[in-house]
Amino acid sequence: MDPLILAVLAVLSSMGGAQILCDLMEVMRKEEEMCAESLAQFNASEGCEGLWDNLSCWPPTPSGRTVSIPCPVVLQLISGINGTVNRNCTENGWSAIFPPIGVACEYNANDTEHKDVQDYYMHLKTLYTVGYGTSLSTLLLALVLLLSFRRLRCTRNYIHMNLFSSFILRSLTVFIKDAVLFSIDDANHCDVYLNECHFVMIFFHYCSMANYSWLLVEGLYLHTLLVVSFFSEWKYFCWYMTLGWGSPLVFIIAWSVCRQLYENTLCWNINSNASVWWIIRGPVILSIFINFILFVRIIRILMKKLRTSDVWGRDLNQYKRLARSTLLLIPLFGVHYIIFAFFPEDVSSGTVKIRLSFELALGSFQGFVVAVLYCFLNGEVQFEIQRKWRRYHLRKYFWLRQNKHSSLSNGGSDLTQVVPLSRSSQEEMKKSSTLTSSLI
């Protein structure tokens, strides 16, 4: 293979792994097919035969003629330069390309700009890998805690568990997507890669949309609690399940069909057709704005309730509770997403680095923040953990006393010592259970 082609493959492979490498190979394959079809239309003639040199297509040319063609498509995609390269048809065949293709197309495989871009994206990948990894581990622990205690099984916590599950799936799909897109560097695997990549991108977008949907469900449920006095939580929960997991499926199926029909190019990770991309982006932005409206309404309701109630004491305490509620609602509703809703998607835009840095940093750690706020700092969860811990120590104490005193008389005295302890523990738990738990 031509040294220039090898250099291009090496640089692009180091920058993007299987994604860019296989995309490049696919472009070259299509160009070769188009060249073969074009050359088949020419009749045999004297001079230089048509040629595909692994980068460009040279038509049949009589001797003594010079042919000028545009720079190879793959180099135009990289450098954005629409230059021309030339070849002479001589009696001995085709001459060398002039000017040199690297000069004419302004491509330098040793350019330090590629290294800078590579370093930036590697740092960005490290950032969101740490963020999603932290979120994944804390969310799994939070989900196990909510499932472990029967007293925590209520509609509100069921919604929290589904929200945790959507964050977990979103984190997993990020790692799966990276494994498929950036791990295979062998061009022989590109056919398998393209098939896998389509399914991975479908699953990735579904999990992302489901995550936004469950953020919306959290907002709707909290708003319903504050506005509606009495309602069937189970009936509402069935609708919430449909909205959270069912509605994204409808849009993903529509997007997949349109993508297959109108934009079936390479891996489905580049969204060139805005109409097709808005099938996914539109519902996401709509859910963000609905949540933002709910967020404002909930804050107004909380302010009204705090001002008209004498339970909280002074104004300072009222505003402290309001600030605390606001702090809890911001990561829950994903209000920060609204900042990036209409940022340009074009990677050539100057704002792309700012957008990627903030969005990936906030988005990757959001699962961790939600797990901490709605599980680890939840008063009900803390009480259940403390109760379980007291029971463990009580059983351990009773077991140690039984092993220490084997006689019947000592065993009876042990019982008299343990029973009051268990009763006091039960009274303490009864008192604690009467405390009003927080809404979130």
Image (tube, helix red, strand yellow):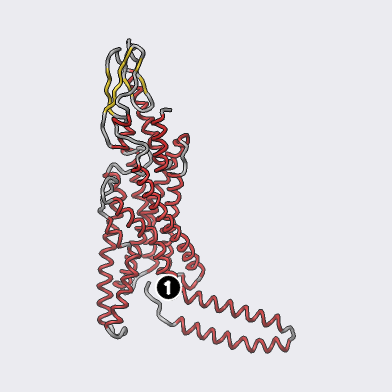
How many numbered markers are drawn? 1
Q: Give residue 302's quadrant in the image.
A: bottom left
Q: Is residue 392 left or right of residue 122?
A: right
The residue depicted at 30 percent of the width and 12 percent of the height is 63
Q: Is residue 61 left or right of residue 25?
A: left
Indicate the secondary structure of the residue bearing disc 1: loop
Whether residue 397 appears in this view of the structure is yes
Whether residue 239 appears in this view of the structure is no
Residue extending farthest to the right is: 407
Q: Position of residue 285 (x, y in %)?
A: 28, 55
Q: Which residue is mark 1?
A: 378
Q: Say above or below: 83 vs 244.
A: above
Could you tell me the amino acid type at mark 1?
Asn
Q: Position of residue 56 (x, y in %)?
A: 34, 26
- Image quadrant containing the N terminus: top left
Q: Nearer the viewer, residue 431 or 321?
A: 321
The residue depicted at 50 percent of the width and 82 percent of the height is 429
The residue depicted at 46 percent of the width and 66 percent of the height is 142
- Image quadrant containing the C terminus: bottom left
Label 1 packing within 10 angstroms: few (<14), some (14-19), many (20+): some
Q: Nearer the viewer, residue 354 or 326?
A: 354
The residue depicted at 44 percent of the width and 75 percent of the height is 380
Residue extending farthest to the top is: 46
Q: Position of residue 410 (x, y in %)?
A: 71, 88
